Image (cartoon, helix red, strand yellow):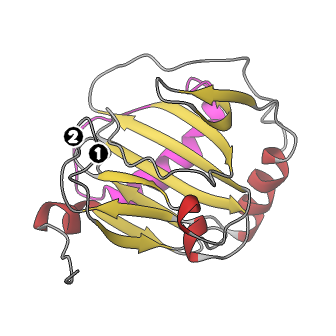
Amino acid sequence: MGIIKPTKKQIKSIQILDNFFTEEEYDKLLQLSKTLPYEPAANKESHFSMRCYFESTENKFNWINKKIKNTFLKGDNTTYYFLCYIFDQRHNKTQIKPHRDDSDWNFICYLSGQSLIYNGTGFWSKQINENKDNCELNTYVGFQKNRAIFFNGRDTVHGDLQALGESSIRITLSIFLYSDKKDCKQKEPLDWSIF
């Protein structure tokens, strides 16, 4: 198998930043992530993680929204709706699940887990079809606490890499941005008083 290069569209749409949150912000998010009421999440294929969804209407999210916009979307005057926020806990040891989301942008920040390459996220160079046999994994982003990944969720095929090798349970904060309003599963609002 030869070297597979990412497409120009992918290169422009995948950004990685270590130490995204300040130490204090990160510690508070990590503390919160360990106390949440996670529930099983599944799609038509199978159960894939434990998740806690939370509402985007909380004013206390503004600091995260602003930080994402100022870091990754500087100069982009599009109005984005930060509609879906998820704390995700997973250890997918059985099968990789490359996919695209319906969001314009995805933000993932690694909160808890072992710093291993297969605990991270992979990106594929080709579009996926129903059988997922046209995917070529070309980019590995290893797990590192407080590492943020920002990419075009609609156009970029991605997924966790845990089924490919040594990994551990990981907790991430995922935020999905849309250029038009969409519905997101919403549960009870969280207590953000720790911020």
The residue under the point 49% across, 20% down is 184
Q: Where is residue 144, by image quadrant? A: bottom right
Instruction: Specify whether 91 is left or right of 158.
Output: right
The residue under the point 67% across, 70% down is 145
| Magenta segment boundaries in residue numbering | 54-82
- Residue 50: mark in rendering: none
Residue 65 falls within the magenta-colored stretch: yes
Q: Position of residue 155 (x, y in %)?
A: 22, 46
Tell me if residue 95 comes above or below residue 188 in the rendering.
Answer: below
Q: Position of residue 73 (x, y in %)?
A: 31, 55
Q: Position of residue 35 (x, y in %)?
A: 87, 40
Instruction: Specify whether 9 is left or right of 184.
Output: left
Tell me if residue 41 comes above or below residue 145 in the rendering.
Answer: above
Would you say the residues marked 2 and 1 are in contact, meaning their CB atoms lie under 8 Å apart? yes
Residue underneath mark 2: 129
The residue under the point 54% across, 65% down is 120
Residue placed most toward the observer, 108 or 115: 115
Q: How far apart are labels 2 and 1 at the CA level? A: 5 Å
- The amino acid type, in three-letter code, at marker 2 is Asn
Residue placed most toward the observer, 124 or 23: 124
- Residue 132: mark in rendering: 1
Q: Position of residue 132 (x, y in %)?
A: 29, 45
Q: In which quarter of the image is the C terminus?
A: top right
